[in-house]
Image (cartoon, rainbow, N blue to C red):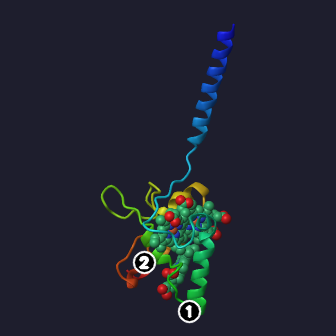
Amino acid sequence: MHVMHILKIISLAVLLLTATGINADVPKPKPIHGEGQCVEPEDDMKRNHMEYILHQRDETMQKGIRTSKHSFKQCVSCHAVKDDNGEYVRIDDPSNKHFCATCHEFAAVSIDCFQCHADTPRSTDKHELRVNK
Ligand code: HEC
Ligand code: HEC
Ligand code: HEC
C-alpha cells in the first residue's frame, strides 16, 4: 500500500513535469540579436522601440535634427540576419527571419516602413532608401 502511494506521487510528479515542459514549448518569437549592444536596454527596447524610431523620424523629418542614436538605418544594419546562402533576409521572406518580422508576424503588427526604407544593410547612405535604388 505504502509503495503504491509513493508510486502514485511519482507518476503525478512526472505528469506535471511533462505538462510544464509542453507549456514551455509554446512558440515565442526568438529574434536573432545583432552584435554589440542595443541602443537602449533590451527590456526598454522590447516595449518602446516604436516610440524611439517614430520619434527619430519626426525629429529628422520635421526639425531636421540628425542624430545617429535611434537611426533606422542602424537598426536595420545591426539586426540584419543572413540566410543559409549568406544572403541578407528580406522583410517579406516567408521564413519571417527578418529581425523586425520575427515578432511582428507573431504579434500581427504590420508596418509600411520598408516600402521606402531599405530592409537590409546598405553600404552608402544614398542607397538607404529603396526608392533611390
Ligand atoms: C549596435 C547594434 C544594435 C543597434 C544599432 C540596434 N540594436 Fe537592437 N539589439 C541589439 C542587441 C545586441 C540586442 C540584444 C539585447 C542586448 O544585448 O542589448 C538588441 C535587442 C533589441 C530588441 C529586443 C529583441 C528581443 O529579443 O526582444 C529590439 C526590439 C531591438 N533591439 C530593436 C532595435 C531598433 C528598433 C533599433 C534602432 C533604433 C536597434 N534595435 C538598434 C543590437 C543593436
Ligand atoms: C521583440 C519583438 C519585436 C521586434 C524584434 C520588433 N518589434 Fe516592432 N513591435 C513589436 C510589438 C509587439 C509591437 C506592437 C506594440 C503595440 O501594439 O503596442 C510593435 C510595433 C512596432 C511599430 C508600431 C506599429 C504601429 O502600427 O504603431 C513599429 C513602427 C515597429 N514595431 C517597428 C519595428 C522595427 C522597424 C523593427 C526591426 C528593426 C521591429 N519593430 C522589431 C514587437 C517587436
Ligand atoms: C513613403 C516613404 C516612407 C515610408 C513609408 C516611411 N519612411 Fe521613414 N523616411 C522616408 C524619407 C524620404 C526619409 C528622409 C530620409 C533622409 O532624409 O535621410 C525618412 C526618414 C526616416 C527616419 C530618420 C532617418 C533615419 O534613418 O533615422 C526614420 C527614423 C524613419 N524614416 C523611420 C520610419 C519608420 C519607422 C517607418 C514606418 C513606420 C517609416 N519611416 C516609413 C520615407 C519613408
Using the image, determine if residue 124 lies above or below residue 39: below
Q: Residue furthest left?
A: 85
Residue for point 46% across, 77% down: 73
Q: Earlier in the sequence, mark 2 or mark 1?
A: 1
Viewer-nearest of labels 2 and 1? 1
Residue linked to disc 1: 64
Q: Amino acid at mark 2?
A: Arg
Label disc, if present, on residue 124 of the rendered structure = none
User: Where residue 77 sits in the image (x, y, percent)?
Assistant: 42, 72
Asked whether, in this view, residue 112 is left or right of residue 2, the answer is: left
Q: Quadrant of ligand 2?
A: bottom right
SS class of the residue under badge 1?
A: loop
Q: Residue at x 42, y 77 (%)?
A: 130
Left or right of 80 on screen, residue 67? right
User: According to the image, label 2 marks what residue?
Assistant: 130
**Mark 1 belongs to which amino acid?**
Gly
**Residue closer to the observer: 24 or 117:** 24
